[in-house]
Image (cartoon, rainbow, N blue to C red):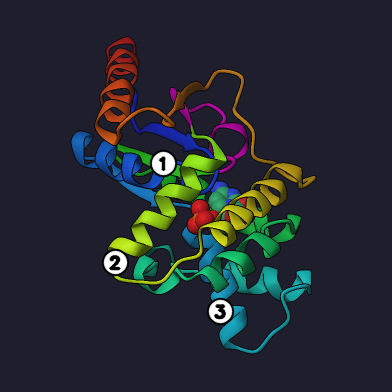
């Protein structure tokens, strides 16, 4: 097998790609990087330091200091950090710095799973497996709402739906590396699919690619 073997997973917020990526990484014993966390960590460092979110040189310097080994989902998951992340993610210098670190990660042996918005198109365009995981905005907002309610929190469905739409527009509409499926990506629409069914579909795509690569 040609190693390292990279699996690129893209899609909009709350489509289920995080859960799917973690399961795939576990199944194949591959390293996993949620690249959204790299944008979130950069944004959090700026917020913590009281620095502006609209100064590209300052944000770029922060991006260079992100430690991929220290990314903590629990700390970075807040709504405020997500919003700030999607603002700095429009800056080409920030993207260049983070993409460089993400590419280095993708070379880990024996293989890697990277999930984000531009993995199949920009970060790892030669990945032997590319998945584009999506679901309707209604379904994604409903899942996020249920997650918060389940965790005992308060949620406003209309506000979450508006937020999902706003994030999509920003991610799909930006000039640098907009969210879109790579031409050779397999589309997985999870609107009507359980995470288990999505995992099985992904597994057969990956197994086929691994046997071609053997
Ligand atoms: O996936 P997550 O919600 O953690 O990502 C936060 C933000 O980081 C996204 O809204 C997106 O703007 C940005 N992002 C990106 N490219 C990636 C991953 C995330 O632009 N590969």
Q: Quadrant of residue 108?
A: top left
Mark 2–mark 1 Cα distance, whole angstroms, equals 20 Å
Region rendered in magenta: 117-133
Residue 165 to residue 53: above or below: above
Circles 2 and 3, Cβ within 8 Å, touching? The answer is no
Residue to which mark 2 is pinned: 151
Q: What secondary structure is found at the residue carrying circle 1?
A: helix
Circles 2 and 1, Cβ within 8 Å, touching? The answer is no
Instruction: Tell whether 66 sits left or right of 193.
Output: right
Q: Which residue is drawn at 73% across and 81% down?
A: 52
Residue to which mark 1 is pinned: 17
- Image spot of residue 173 (x, y percent): 76, 44
- Residue 100 visible in the shown view: no
For the residue pair 172 and 108, the one nearer the viewer reads as 172
**Local crowd size for mark 3, using a 10 Å CA cut-off: few (<14), some (14–19), many (≥20):** some
- Image spot of residue 128 (x, y percent): 43, 22
- Looking at marks 2 and 1 on the same chain, the residue that comes earlier in the sequence is marked by 1
**Local crowd size for mark 1, using a 10 Å CA cut-off: few (<14), some (14–19), many (≥20):** many
- Image spot of residue 181 (x, y percent): 59, 28
| Callout in the foreground (2, 1) | 2
Residue to which mark 3 is pinned: 45
Q: Quadrant of ligand 1?
A: bottom right
Mark 2–mark 3 Cα distance, whole angstroms, equals 26 Å
For the residue pair 213 and 204, the one nearer the viewer reads as 204
Residue 209 to residue 76: above or below: above
Which quadrant, please, contains the C terminus?
top left
Q: Quadrant of residue 43?
A: bottom right
Whether the magenta-drawn stretch holds residue 128 is answered as yes
Which quadrant, please, contains the N terminus?
top left
Q: Residue at x 56, y 86 (%)?
A: 48
Assess mark 1: CB under 8 A from ligand 1?
yes
Instruction: Tell whether 165 sits left or right of 68.
Output: right
């Amino acid at each position: 097998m040609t190693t390292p073997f990279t699996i690129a997973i893209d899609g909009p917020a709350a489509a289920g790609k995080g859960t799917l990526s973690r399961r795939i990484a576990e199944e194949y014993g591959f390293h996993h990087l949620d690249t959204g966390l790299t944008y979130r960590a950069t944004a959090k460092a700026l917020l913590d330091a009281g620095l502006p979110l609209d100064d590209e040189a300052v944000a770029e310097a922060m991006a260079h200091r992100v430690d991929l080994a220290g990314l903590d989902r629990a700390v970075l998951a807040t709504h405020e950090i997500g919003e700030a992340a999607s603002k700095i993610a429009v800056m080409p210098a920030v993207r260049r710095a983070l993409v460089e670190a993400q590419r280095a990660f993708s070379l880990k042996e024996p293989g890697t799973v990277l999930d984000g918005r531009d993995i199949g198109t920009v970060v790892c365009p030669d990945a032997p497996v590319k998945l584009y995981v999506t679901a309707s905005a209604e379904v994604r907002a409903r899942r996020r709402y249920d997650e918060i309610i389940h965790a005992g929190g308060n949620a406003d469905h209309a506000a979450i739906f508006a937020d999902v739409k706003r994030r999509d527009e920003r991610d799909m509409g930006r000039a640098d590396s907009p969210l879109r499926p790579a031409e050779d990506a397999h589309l997985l629409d999870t609107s009507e699919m359980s995470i288990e069914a999505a995992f099985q579909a992904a597994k057969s795509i990956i197994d086929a690619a691994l046997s071609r690569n053997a």
